[in-house]
Amino acid sequence: MAGGIGSRFWPMSTSEKPKQFLDILGVGRTLIQQTYDRFANICPVENIYVVTNEVYKDLVIDQLQINPQQVIAEPLRRNTAPCIAYASFKIAALNPDANLIVAPSDHLILNQPEYEKIMGLALNQAMSEDCLITLGIKPSRPDTGYGYIQFIEANNEQSGLIKKVKTFTEKPDLTLAEEFLESGDFYWNGGIFIWTAKSIMNALEGLLPEVYNLFKEGEGKYNTAEEAAFIANAYERCKNISIDYGVMEKAENVYVVLSDFGWSDLGTWGSLYDNLNKAEGGNAVVGKKVFMYNSSNCIVNIPDDKLVILQGLDDYIVVQSEDTLLICKKADEQKIKDMVSEVNGHAK
């Protein structure tokens, strides 16, 4: 899934070139390229499909050098349930027995062998039973920006990592997040799903029939010249709803695979800071002419041709992209998305 605009990474991430198409880690590969590389180890590259907004289709093809037929272009943003429904119907038309892994294009995975092991466990479970599987990430702190999954013991466990899901809780307050962490039976919702095409389509039919029926109307048109016109019409009529809210929180047959493979959704500047190398004072600096004085625990990202001197800052985000400068406390980074909306509103 590569259609988001990454507004929390503003001003680097913009609607013209969102964060999945940027090398925000400074490793020479963009986030979507790293995700592609990761899955090239798990399945044949011709089986990797990218769902994105149609305005990014050329960007995807350029960065991944893949067959244009492997890029599923959405005409409008309608959240993850329609995105998954569309891709599932399209892939099922090619292979009704397909096993599907659904993953965001902008996550960081540090331990590839462990990731592949977890995927193998999840795929085996999905193929042996009509179920929906999500990856739960072992929490390292009481983060209020993530959803949480509560699990119970399952009857059919493989190596003790596959559990039955009891509840989903979206972005709790700090007190509740601390209780979740202390209890030990809550993991972060990583937003990575594994199921068969049949299982997810059954779930959509039962729990989100308005979305299921809309895309079912296209049977016979997927992977033909008629697909684009059908999809343009379908998305105009389709509701905006996430797969978590529309299906996962309501389904009975949901399992979670307890995972610890060095994951970050890189959803905020703070999460990026956690994964960058730190210089003196705990500062994570990108930029060749950045000078820090009496400053600590900051994340700074400045173009190489800009000279920046910072004095007396602690726990700040300082980012310049083209003609825009952001200076914000790390503690307030969840407000960046709202600030961007307000700024764009004034700009109009």
Image (spheres, rainbow, N blue to C red):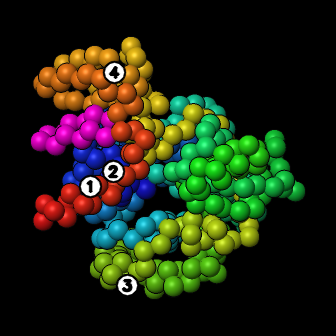
Q: Which residue is mark 2?
A: 336
Residue extending farthest to the front is: 312
Q: Which mark is residue 179?
A: none
Image coordinates for residue 123, horizontal then vertical, percent: 67, 52
Q: Residue 305's x, y, as percent? A: 12, 24
Q: Which residues are magenta?
A: 317-328
Q: Nearer the viewer, residue 329 or 202?
A: 329
Question: Which of the marked residues, 3 or 2, is nearer the chain's N terminus?
Answer: 3
Q: Nearer the viewer, mark 3 or mark 2?
A: 2
The three-letter amino acid code for the residue at tag 1 is Val
How far apart in space, not on screen, are marks 1 and 2 (Cα)?
6 Å
Horizontal side of 161 relative to 316 (left or right) equals right
Task: Please indicate whether residue 186 sits to the left or right of residue 208 in the image.
Answer: right
Q: CA distance from mark 1 to mark 3?
A: 28 Å
Give coordinates of residue 2: x percent, y percent.
38, 54
> Which tag is nearer the camera, tag 4 or tag 2?
4
Looking at the image, do the residues carrying marks 3 and 2 touch, with CB atoms under 8 Å apart? no
The residue identified by callout 4 is 295
Q: Amino acid at mark 2?
A: Ile
Residue designated by label 3: 237
Please give the residue where the numbered disc 1 appears in the rendered image. Answer: 340
Marks 2 and 1: in contact by CB < 8 Å? yes
Please indicate, yes or no, whether residue 320 appears anywhere in the rendered image: yes
Q: Is residue 238 magenta?
A: no
Q: Main secondary structure of the magenta part?
A: strand
Q: Residues within 10 Å of mark 2 (few under 14, many from 20)?
A: some
The amino acid type found where label 4 is placed reads Ser
Query: Which residue appears at 71% of the width and 48% of the height?
Result: 179
Q: Quadrant of the N terminus?
A: bottom left
